[in-house]
Image: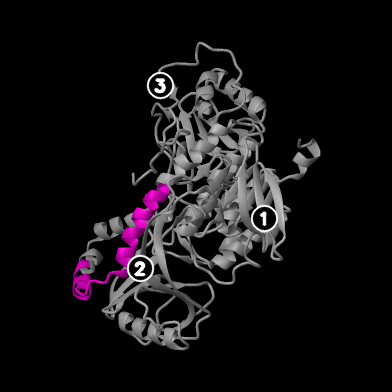
């Protein structure tokens, strides 16, 4: 029988794999007060980088984690994509985020090694050490725990009990293998990655794509001056022999860009055959998989690391709520329900990106100038392409509108709807202090309920006060533009001129419920006890919201419908 001392000592969550997904999961669980143990089979942190692109939605997530400034300091902001073919410049596509508001309208080029270094430092500040050279070799699930077998570098085995296990252990995941989850899909193309110094007369203010009859290459500029990540879609068989990679890449770039390009000694090259595979589910009772353990695919659109980080964040806040007893275990079902369809959509989009990047058609050299000549001259068409490409890569249009956690309210005006990013609004006109307060609120580890001040009658304020008193440990309740005396509701949130409320589409008495990952769960034109009770129901709170029925609770247009749980949900597409 396990005693209380043993329960207090054992990890609540054990994470296998200290890459970006594992580090993110560990950070967010520890930030919420859970005991986390993080192990990795490698002897030390990786010294080379597969991923180099961090997209806007992931930067928003870093902001919520409190680490975005450290990431920005180590990377280069990229806002353009320039295409060449056989020495001719075809088109330069500038970043256009006007239809996708974000505080980070760019892709950050940052080596995965740097990303992991920032995450490790943040994790260390929370008191979590990484155990290197520790391999997971077995697991057995029980109704209340997972028994895991670990093996250190000397071969010594250890049995560890944990409440939950998260496998972030990469494409060859032992956790996935032990669960019997099939990574279904196909093998695909062989490409080469290289980190090299490059000398040429083009500025490092864009990602370059260069097409030749021998195939296509991509160039991504690092923050370190003169250094680039190169991706060759048709490497020669002897590309990694001494001196051959640099010679081959220099000649191919010179032809594609139409200028002299010199590629210096490589810091790292890798020729690999990537795959397009994913699991059909990401949970087996008390065990989960995330990142490359759940899906592997082409690096063409730079989505792998970003997706893994989003998955880890999605899982961590749900796991913390369940482990701390604030909600029922059914909340964890939404992890697979929300993320598996996004993984499937990701495979589709990366297949398209792969085809476009490699573009091996021999006629491309003749056709591309004609096609992009039209694109270059037609402003609306060019902008539409820019937004389409950005929408697919940025992560800003992925959402959870059909998730069981997104409840449907009667339309109450503009602003982000259930399942959409709460930050998908233009905040330029709002007061700087209000923006800072809003950013700080989104860094809170709890759900957030925003009530717009100024409603007539006391029902909205009373409902908000009740929610704050009863659910304070996991729900932050704030009153936009509220008075300090609390008459409008609890915890006033500065909003001079109601500019933030207007941007969010909130009128006096209206409300917005935001998940811990920054997505809207529900909203409505008037807050009441009953409306809020039904809005919170899909989150599965341990106790129902208190408050007696009130005659004003159900006026027309205030109802919230709680949808039945779905077997799977589709990610939000372009809208």
* Quadrant location of the N terminus in the rendered image: top right
435 relative to 414, above or below:
below
Q: Residue furthest right?
A: 5
Residue 243: % across, % down: 46, 89
Q: Residue at x 58, y 67 (%)?
A: 113
Name the residue: 60% across, 38% down. Answer: 494
User: What distance separates the C-alpha of mark 1 from that of mark 2?
Assistant: 35 Å
Magenta residues span 342-371
Q: Is residue 538 above or below residue 397?
A: above
Q: Which residue is mark 1?
A: 150
Give the structural element (helix, strand or loop) at label 3: loop
Q: Nearer the viewer, residue 137 or 46?
A: 137
446 in magenta: no
Mark 1 crowdedness (10 Å alpha carbons): few <14, some 14-19, many ≥20: many
**Nearer mark to the viewer, of 1 and 2:** 1
Q: Nearer the viewer, mark 2 or mark 3?
A: 2
Q: Is residue 369 magenta?
A: yes
Q: Nearer the viewer, residue 273 or 566?
A: 273
State the SS at label 2. Answer: strand
Q: Which mark is residue 189?
A: 2
Residue drawn at the location 40% of the way across and 70% of the way down: 207
Question: Which mark, by number, is residue 249?
Answer: none
For the stretch drawn in magenta, the main secondary structure is helix
**Which label is found at residue 557?**
3
Q: Residues within 10 Å of mark 3 (few under 14, many from 20)?
A: few
Give percent across and percent down for residue 60.
Answer: 52, 51
Distance from disc 2 to disc 3, alpha carbons, whole Å, reads 54 Å
- Quarter of the picture containing the C terminus is top left
Q: Nearer the viewer, mark 3 or mark 1?
A: 1
């Amino acid at each position: 029988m396990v005693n209380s001392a043993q329960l207090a000592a054992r990890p609540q969550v054990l994470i296998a794999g200290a890459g970006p997904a594992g580090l993110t999961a560990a950070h967010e669980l520890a930030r919420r007060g859970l005991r986390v143990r993080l192990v990795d089979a490698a002897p030390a942190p990786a010294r080379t980088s597969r991923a180099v692109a961090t997209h806007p939605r992931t930067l928003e997530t870093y902001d919520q984690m409190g680490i975005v400034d450290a990431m920005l300091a180590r990377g280069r902001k990229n806002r353009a994509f320039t295409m060449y073919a056989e020495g001719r410049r075809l088109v330069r596509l500038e970043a256009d985020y006007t239809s996708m508001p974000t505080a980070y309208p760019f892709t950050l080029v940052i080596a995965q090694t740097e990303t992991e270094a920032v995450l490790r430092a943040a994790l260390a500040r929370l008191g979590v050490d990484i155990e290197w050279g520790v391999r997971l070799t077995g697991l057995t699930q029980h109704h209340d725990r997972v028994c895991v077998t670990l093996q250190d570098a000397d071969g010594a085995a250890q049995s560890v009990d944990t409440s939950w296990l998260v496998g972030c252990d990469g494409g060859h995941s032992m956790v996935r293998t032990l669960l019997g989850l099939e990574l279904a899909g196909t093998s695909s193309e062989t490409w080469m990655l290289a980190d090299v110094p490059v000398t040429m007369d083009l500025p490092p203010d864009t990602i370059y794509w260069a097409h030749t009859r021998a195939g296509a290459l991509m160039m991504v500029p690092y923050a370190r001056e003169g250094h680039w990540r190169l991706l060759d879609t048709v490497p020669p068989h002897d590309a990694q022999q001494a001196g051959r990679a640099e010679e081959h890449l220099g000649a191919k770039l010179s032809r594609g860009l139409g200028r002299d390009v010199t590629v210096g000694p490589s810091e790292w090259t890798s020729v690999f055959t990537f795959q397009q595979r994913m699991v059909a589910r990401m949970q087996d009772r008390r065990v989960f998989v995330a990142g490359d353990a759940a899906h592997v695919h082409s690096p063409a659109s730079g989505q792998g690391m970003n997706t893994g980080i989003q998955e880890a964040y999605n899982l961590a806040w749900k796991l913390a709520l369940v482990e701390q007893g604030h909600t029922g275990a059914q909340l964890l079902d939404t992890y697979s329900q929300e993320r598996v369809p996004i993984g499937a959509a990701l495979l589709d989009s990366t297949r398209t990106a792969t085809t476009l990047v490699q573009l091996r058609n021999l006629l491309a050299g003749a056709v591309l100038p004609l096609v992009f000549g039209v694109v270059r001259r037609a402003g609306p068409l060019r902008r539409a392409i820019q937004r389409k490409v950005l929408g697919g890569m940025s992560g800003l249009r992925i959402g959870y509108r059909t998730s069981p956690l997104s409840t449907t309210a009667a339309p109450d005006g503009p602003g982000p709807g259930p399942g959409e990013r709460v930050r998908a609004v233009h905040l330029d006109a709002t007061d700087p202090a209000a923006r800072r307060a809003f950013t700080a609120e989104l860094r809170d580890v709890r759900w957030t309920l925003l009530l717009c001040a100024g409603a007539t009658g006391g029902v909205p304020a009373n409902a908000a006060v009740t929610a704050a008193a009863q659910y304070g440990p996991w729900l932050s309740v704030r009153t936009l533009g509220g008075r300090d005396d609390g008459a409008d509701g609890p915890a006033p949130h500065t909003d001079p001129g109601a500019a933030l409320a207007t941007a969010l589409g909130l009128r006096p008495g209206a409300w917005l419920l935001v998940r811990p990952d920054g997505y809207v769960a529900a909203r409505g034109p008037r807050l009441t006890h009953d409306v809020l009770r039904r809005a919170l129901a899909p989150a599965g709170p341990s106790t129902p919201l208190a408050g007696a029925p009130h005659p004003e609770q159900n006026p027309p247009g205030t109802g919230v419908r709680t949808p039945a749980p779905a077997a799977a949900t589709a990610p939000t597409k372009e809208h």
